[in-house]
Image (cartoon, rainbow, N blue to C red):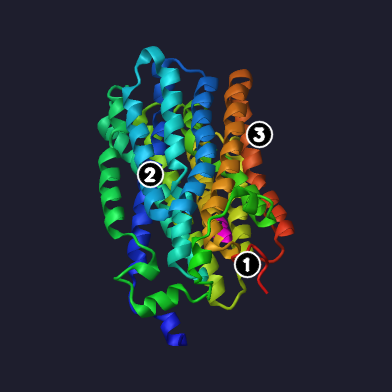
């Protein structure tokens, strides 16, 4: 393989695949973000307490935890083409089923619908990260992950932007918000089934582009590539648990996503869907830039000769420092200062997430990526459930002062987690197909 060929491969079909990952993640986050936007309205309409709202969010995360593990295994076993299709079909059906919930059983109905949504949505990131590992060399994976992960923020921006167009200011027609993404999902599944193959099998991938994709000289042994891993193989590995501990920070992202609207209403009196939507759009736009910028950051360092270990960890440190000021969000009396602090932290989290996901493909063989991402996602979802329970009960008993503690923990958590990751993985040495350290 020539140096020139590796720098400027002929063909860029891998970016078409990346565009599909971006679109799927956008749809995914539109579906899940609807609850965060409509939360204050639905709490008032159905007379839910903070604890009730917490239980609804806990149902989503409980299913997400189960789905992260089961869907990760399904994707590793059956491949990204079938696994991704199954995932988006499940979450789309249950997303639209929210609209069928009636006031007489609103709490139970929403808990059931959120549970089904969580099972399906759990497949998105294991499938997307595995696809990136299949289609991009290591030096480009953080950037590619940042691109598709930016779809989470685009989806989160579209939700508060579209909902005021289909839902009345008093909450009437709230059902329409949960029906919007069904058509998008159907189009995506059609394109995915028609487009996706592994790069080695794809007729539209040039020889030069395939060389570029496979430049890391990872094994191409067909039998080893087809081998499927059980949990018992990856669960004991410290590489698995370093990533899983890193995913505890998902609890902070879930807090921003599902509780920011409640926070702005309870502390600052933002009542209308339009006012809340404006604040949330600002937060998710900044998060979008963070996702892409975070992925580019480690690529920037690598292109300047930094080794992988330094590039990833310094990038994570910069992200953690951007998140730290959110500790003061509950102390300000100015809503836009609070919005700015949460926006900066959201951008920092998404940049952190892009680099954290890439750690998996840095140290694990491709056949294990989705399972490891699934295990980490399960840990993150469980952490999010604990936050929902603590917030729901804490706010009902202590009032708005309880937000101070959540924002304080959110601001400090990333620095602590990064220190733990570094202690567990002082050097990012990759494992081979037999899950042994490469020489």
Residue 391: mark in rendering: none
Q: Is residue 187 visible?
A: yes
> Where residue 382 sits in the image (x, y, percent)?
59, 36
- Chain-order first, disc 1 or disc 3: 3
**Which residue was labeled with disc 1?**
430
Mark 3, other Cα within 10 Å: few <14 / some 14–19 / many ≥20 = few
Residue beneath the point at 69% across and 51% down = 236
Q: CA distance from mark 3 to mark 2?
A: 39 Å
> Where residue 2 sits in the image (x, y, percent)?
45, 87
Mark 2 or mark 1, which is nearer to you? Answer: 2
Q: Label 3, secondary structure: give it.
A: helix
Q: Label 2, secondary structure: give it.
A: helix
> Where residue 308 sits in the image (x, y, percent)?
60, 70
Main SS of the magenta part reads helix
Above or below: residue 170 compared with residue 152 = above
Mark 2, other Cα within 10 Å: few <14 / some 14–19 / many ≥20 = some
372 and 56: which is toward the camera: 372
Tag 2 and tag 1, C-beta contact below 8 Å:
no
- Chain-order first, disc 3 or disc 2: 2
**Which residue was labeled with disc 3?**
405
407 and 6: which is toward the camera: 6
Residue beneath the point at 46% across and 36% down = 118
Above or below: residue 126 compared with residue 92 = below
Span of residues in magenta: 356-360
């Amino acid at each position: 393989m020539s140096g020139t060929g590796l720098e400027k491969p002929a063909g860029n079909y891998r970016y078409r695949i990346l565009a599909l990952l971006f679109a799927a993640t956008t749809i995914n986050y539109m579906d899940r973000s609807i609850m965060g936007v409509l939360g204050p309205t639905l709490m008032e309409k159905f007379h839910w307490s903070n604890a009730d709202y917490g239980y609804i969010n806990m149902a989503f995360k409980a299913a997400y935890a189960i789905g992260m593990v089961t869907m990760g295994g399904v994707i590793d076993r059956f491949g990204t083409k079938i696994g991704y299709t199954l995932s988006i079909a499940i979450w789309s059906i249950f997303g639209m089923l929210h609209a069928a919930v009636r006031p007489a059983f609103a709490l139970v109905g929403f808990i059931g619908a959120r549970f089904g949504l969580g099972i399906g949505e759990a497949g998105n990131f294991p499938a997307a990260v595995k696809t990136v590992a299949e289609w991009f060399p290591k030096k480009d994976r953080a950037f590619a992950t940042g691109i598709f992960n930016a779809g989470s923020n685009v989806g989160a921006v579209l939700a508060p932007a579209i909902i005021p167009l289909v839902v009345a200011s008093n909450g009437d027609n709230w059902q329409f918000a949960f029906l919007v993404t069904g058509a998008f999902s159907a189009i995506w599944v059609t394109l995915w089934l028609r487009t996706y193959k592994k790069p080695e099998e794809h007729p539209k991938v040039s020889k030069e582009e395939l060389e570029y994709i496979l430049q890391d000289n990872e094994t191409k042994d067909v039998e080893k590539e087809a081998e499927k891993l059980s949990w018992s193989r990856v669960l004991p590995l410290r590489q698995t648990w370093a990533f899983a501990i890193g995913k505890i920070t998902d609890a902070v992202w879930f807090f921003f996503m599902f509780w920011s609207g409640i926070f702005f209403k309870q502390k600052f009196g933002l009542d209308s869907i339009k006012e809340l939507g404006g604040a949330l759009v600002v937060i998710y736009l900044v998060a979008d830039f963070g996702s892409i910028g975070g992925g580019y950051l480690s690529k920037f360092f690598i292109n300047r000769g930094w080794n992988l270990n330094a590039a990833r960890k310094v990038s994570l440190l910069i992200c953690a420092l951007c998140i730290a000021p959110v500790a003061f969000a509950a102390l300000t009396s100015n809503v836009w200062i609070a919005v700015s602090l949460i926006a900066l932290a959201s951008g920092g989290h998404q940049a952190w997430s892009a680099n954290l996901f890439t750690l998996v493909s840095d140290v694990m063989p491709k056949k294990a990526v989705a399972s490891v991402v699934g295990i980490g996602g399960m840990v993150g979802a469980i952490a999010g459930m604990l936050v929902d329970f603590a917030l729901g009960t804490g706010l009902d008993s202590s009032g708005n002062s309880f937000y101070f503690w959540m924002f304080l923990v959110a601001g400090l958590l990333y620095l602590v987690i990064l220190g733990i990751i570094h202690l567990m993985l002082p050097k990012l040495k990759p494992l081979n197909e037999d899950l042994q350290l490469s020489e």
